[in-house]
């Protein structure tokens, strides 16, 4: 498996990152999702989703894009969103804007049957998607973004769902040089709710959908960090027990997971500093091959 990086404006000079697929019950179905996107000819969406690797994504730039997307939405649907971001650190407004994405973009493929979409132009969907991407980008920047690359295929259908066996594979103890699954639902999972202080979200949505989307991680989380995340999420559940139980989620529900599923690891041992210095010369995912 190869992830090929390049510069956005220079396709000739590339860096190939070679990975071995991890043997677990989930990865064959993840590969099927990838093959579906290839069969359809779907392009990688936003091939420049590099985090903590270069200085291209500043808070100022992301701030401007978020408000630009709000303006674009309001131009198509006048007066729909009545607030814009005035401070990059304003988590409440980021949560507020995300609630509009949850409602009007809707869950996976819901737009096909939602009456709200009947008279809306198709170009509105990627604008909503962009708004969501850059809301989360700003949150990552505010939290101190660690080196990563996210790869998504926006238009590929996502009919497959996680099984109980899949949930047992989730971890939030990330390892340098590994590829992990990405949250592919619309809403907020337990960790997002625990850390975002979100009074505007429409609903709790645990990970349920399987997608080809994935994240390349170039950092290690410590055992202490992992334990803290687990404890914070458990504490949030306990403080909001009535809400979760009203939605049908007991404390030991197997769907109350955080993190992601490991998918692949770098084929060859490498010096982390040396590899990061190589990756920092690039800003574009040119291609993604599973052979």
Image (cartoon, rainbow, N blue to C red):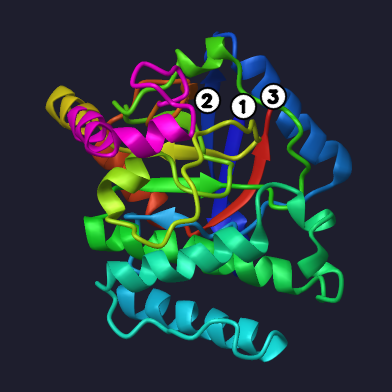
Percent position of residue 107, x then y? 65, 49
**Residue 201 — which label?**
none
Q: Report if residue 203 is visible in the image.
A: yes
- Residue 133 versus residue 83 in the image, above or below: above
Tell me the quarter of the picture where residue 245 sits. top left
> Which quadrant does the C terminus fall into?
top right
- Front residue of this view, candidates 160 and 254: 254
* Relative horizontal placement of residue 202, taking residue 25 as reference (left or right): left
Classify mark 1: helix, strand or loop.
Answer: loop
Q: Residue 191 or 146: which is nearer the viewer?
A: 191
Residue 245 is inside the magenta segment: yes
Give x and y (percent) for residue 82: 49, 86
Q: Is 148 positioned to the left or the right of 116 in the image?
A: left
| Range covered by the magenta-colored residues | 231-256
Mark earlier in primary sequence (1, 2) = 1
Q: Disc number at residue 19?
A: 2
Badge 1 vs badge 3, beta-carbon distance below 8 Å: no
Q: Which residue is drawn at 77% across and 45% down?
A: 156
Position of 132 with respect to 191 (left or right) is right
Residue at screen point 39% across, 21% down? 250
Identify the secondary structure beneath mark 3: helix
Mark 3 neighbour density, 10 Å: few (under 14) some (14–19) many (20 or more): some
Q: Which of 49 and 260 is in front in this view?
A: 260
- Please tell me whether mark 2 sits on a helix, a strand or a loop: strand
Q: In which quarter of the image is the N terminus?
A: top right
Instruction: Find the distance from the CA under tag 1 to the CA under tag 2.
Output: 5 Å
* Residue at mark 1: 1
Disc on res. 31: 3
Mark 1 in CB contact with mark 2 (< 8 angstroms): yes
């Amino acid at each position: 498996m190869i992830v090929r990086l390049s510069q956005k404006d220079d396709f000739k000079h590339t860096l190939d990152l070679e990975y071995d697929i991890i043997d677990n019950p989930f990865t064959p179905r993840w590969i099927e999702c990838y093959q579906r996107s290839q069969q359809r000819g779907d392009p990688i969406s936003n091939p420049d989703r590099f985090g903590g690797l270069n200085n291209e994504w500043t808070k100022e730039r992301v701030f401007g894009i978020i408000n630009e997307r709000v303006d674009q939405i309001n131009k198509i649907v006048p007066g729909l969103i009545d607030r814009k971001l005035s401070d990059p650190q304003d988590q409440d407004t980021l949560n507020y804007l995300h609630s509009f994405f949850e409602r009007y973009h809707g869950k996976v493929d819901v737009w096909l049957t939602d009456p709200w979409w009947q008279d809306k132009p198709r170009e509105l969907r990627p604008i909503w998607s962009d708004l969501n991407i850059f809301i989360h980008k700003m949150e990552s920047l505010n939290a101190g973004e660690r080196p990563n690359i996210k790869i998504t295929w926006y238009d590929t259908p996502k009919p497959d769902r996680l099984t109980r066996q899949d949930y047992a594979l989730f971890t939030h103890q990330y390892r340098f040089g590994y590829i992990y699954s990405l949250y592919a639902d619309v809403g907020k999972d337990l960790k997002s709710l625990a850390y975002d202080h979100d009074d505007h979200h429409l609903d709790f949505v645990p990970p349920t959908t399987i997608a080809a989307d994935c994240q390349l991680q170039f950092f290690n989380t410590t055992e202490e960090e992992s334990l803290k995340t687990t404890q914070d999420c458990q504490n949030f559940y306990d403080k909001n027990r009535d809400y979760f139980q009203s939605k049908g989620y007991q404390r030991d529900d197997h769907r109350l997971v955080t993190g992601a599923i490991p998918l692949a690891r770098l084929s060859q041992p490498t010096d982390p500093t040396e590899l990061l210095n190589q990756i920092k010369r690039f800003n574009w995912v040119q291609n993604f091959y599973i052979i």
